[in-house]
Image: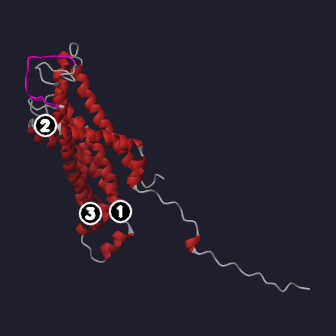
Amino acid sequence: MTDSRREVPRPARLAADEPSLPQRPKAYQLLLRDKRAIAGLTVLGLIIVSTLFAPIISPYDPLSQEFDILLPPSPTHVLGTDDLGRDLFTRILYGARVSLFVGVSTVLISMLLGVAMGILSGYYGGWIDIIFMRYIDLQWAFPNFIIAVYLVAVFGTGLANVIVAISLAFLDDFARITRGMALSIREEEYVLAARSIGASGSRVMLRHILPNAIAPIIVQATLSVSFAILAEAGLSFLGLGVKASTPTWGLIISDARSFFTRAWWLGIYPGLAIMITVLSINFFGDALRDALDVRVE
């Protein structure tokens, strides 16, 4: 006798019931989980706040000369005094203003110029690409610092000239990164679709290519700030930076060369300031690179 019961087919599982793949956390969530990013941002924030409130934190004038020369660190002068009796802690605070201003401003200028060159070269190609990229190849033949030294020697010393020199020396990195991204993105279907409906080249570059290429540009800009700070300190150390009356970390270390055996604090503390600032920026830049890299799970 056959079994009259028929097996009832199970309903197909709805797509909503299927387990979905875990989504990658957003960039800011990854940054908040990264201890390097938190440490870098905390230290960098403290440095920025200290420079903004330097007159309140330190009662001394960074240019005021006193008779208390080469005093070691003490409760009165936390980091000691230099050969002209100026408070070293105050000069380091005011020197951070110059270093951070030069670092941020030079990167903004070089980023604007480099991104413009790179996106035009990558999108249009042809003679525009040949002219821009041959110039970038020529610039890549020399170290960035050597280019900055040469440009300062041509333009002269001073804060504005230092910013221009470092900006021109660093634009090749942004140009190459942007060009590589533009070459890849311009072949995407949404770019081809925008061009097929008559979108202008400027609209395609600004609305489609640049937003999709912004992540590596931001990472490069963050890391370039530390290199710009080091470049400014190097130029000031060589006497090719800002005026001698302006307190900068490079000038402070340069003045400390003659007194290093007698007053060790003159070179150690500004060197530590440079190291801590650059490390904090690099920590945040490395974490930002990992957070914006879609290949990292």
Q: Mark 2 points at which residue?
A: 152
Q: Which amino acid does label 1 sit on?
A: Ile
* Magenta highlight range: 58-72
Q: Which of marks 1 and 3 precedes in the sequence?
A: 3
**Looking at the magenta stretch, what is its main secondary structure?**
loop
Q: Is mark 2 on a helix, strand or loop?
A: helix
Q: Which amino acid does label 2 sit on?
A: Val
| C-alpha separation, residue under disc 2 versus residue under disc 3 | 33 Å
Q: Mark 1 points at which residue?
A: 185
Residue closest to the eye, 72 or 105: 72
Q: Name the residue under label 3.
A: 124
Q: Give percent across and percent down for residue 293.
A: 41, 53
Left or right, 109 with respect to 224, comes to left
Q: Which of marks 2 and 1 precedes in the sequence?
A: 2
Residue 294, compared with residue 164, is above or below; it is below
Q: Which amino acid does label 3 sit on?
A: Tyr
> What's the residue at 19%, 27% (across, down)?
89
